[in-house]
Image (spheres, rainbow, N blue to C red):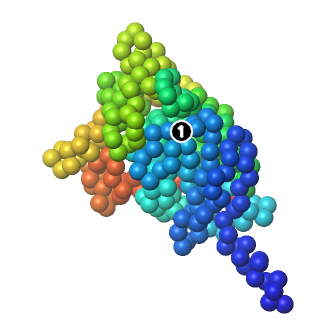
Amino acid sequence: MSGPAAPAAQAATAPPHFADGFGLTVVSQPKWAGPEKRTFVVTVKSRQVPTYDAMEGQVSGEHVLMVTLPTGYNGAAATRYPVLYHLHGAGDRPNSVWTKTLAEQATKGVPLITVTPNGSGHGWYSNWRNPGSRGPQNWETFHLKQVIPFIDANLRTIAAKAGRAIVGHSMGGFGAFHYAEDRPDLFRYAGSFSADLDLQSPWGRGAVVGSGVVPAYGKPYAAPDAIFGSPLWPLDGAWNEASPAHHVKALRGMGVALYTGDGGNLLDNPIQAAVEKGAQVTTATMAEHLTAAGIPYRFVDYGDGSRWAKGCTGKHAQFPCLQADMNDYVKLIMKRLRHP
């Protein structure tokens, strides 16, 4: 009698098995990312982004997806769960320790799947206009037309708008609203943490161009016109078209949430303080356009962070601030998403 029990026990602790599909080829089957056995990574390839500007530790052309499952998830059961797509920022990785921690801490006891796909160090969640010798850099197509149906096919998801939300930090916050505005049929809720949401502003364009020449964000460098074409008038039409703050009408009927600090003490980590101040300005522009369009939204401007979270001082990439953002956002979306 002990023989049959062993495989069952093993199956209960194994991560799900993924099948190829929707243009994605599985390179490496899911592997648990920690002893909690809630989060796993799966690696795929896509012809939409066959190579990319890899950062240290990445393999160009191989895309890691990190997935956090609800406690008690069982692929053989009938229960289906909503999905939160969490987009990482510039210079970050989908499988970073802090991205994993953000998802696991915010979803303790919550019936929600969280998925963080690779967006590269400076991919900007867009189909590039001038990728050059890299080949196609169709990040938007990769994520919306391949990753989403791939996840729905391989996990017990609620495969509908009523079961999906999206959010991101910095570059990822831009991506979240860019995707939600391009495909409002896919998402019930959209949000951003300290994001660049105004590509018509010099700061917004500077953030995109600047991220392309930071060595740690991936090599070779991305030319100023690689993603959206020339940033200079009158050739800047694609920048204007992609600016989330200026196309908010597509969000009507969707839940919307914005989070930002003000950088806090500018003498303390001045680069992170200045970047957050810029994000605050573009987020405020987004809020103004939402107000003008009559679209309800939640805007948390936590200033220097002292009243938002312990250890948060209002900087741009500060874990306590982001964990508080994520905790609040998950509570919001679970009031609107269909779930068990």
| Residue at the image point whose x is 32% and y is 46% from the top | 316
Q: Secondary structure at mark 1?
A: loop
* 329 relative position to 254: left or right: left
Of 300 and 137, the residue lying toward us: 137
- Residue 330 in the image, given as x and y percentages of width and height: 53, 53
On screen, residue 74 above or below 118: below
- Residue 34 in the image, given as x and y percentages of width and height: 53, 69
Rendered-image quadrant of the C terminus: bottom right
On screen, residue 154 above or below 178: below
* 140 relative position to 54: left or right: right
| Residue at the image point whose x is 23% and y is 47% from the top | 264
Of 134 and 121, the residue lying toward us: 134
In this view, the residue farthest toward the left is: 267
Instruction: Specify the amino acid type for callout 1.
Output: Thr
Quadrant for residue 76, please give it: bottom right
In this view, the residue farthest toward the front is: 133
Can residue 322 be seen in the rendering of this structure? yes
| Residue at the image point whose x is 40% and y is 41% from the top | 218
| Residue at the image point whose x is 44% and y is 53% from the top | 57
In this view, the residue farthest toward the top is: 234
**Location of mark 1 (residue):** 51
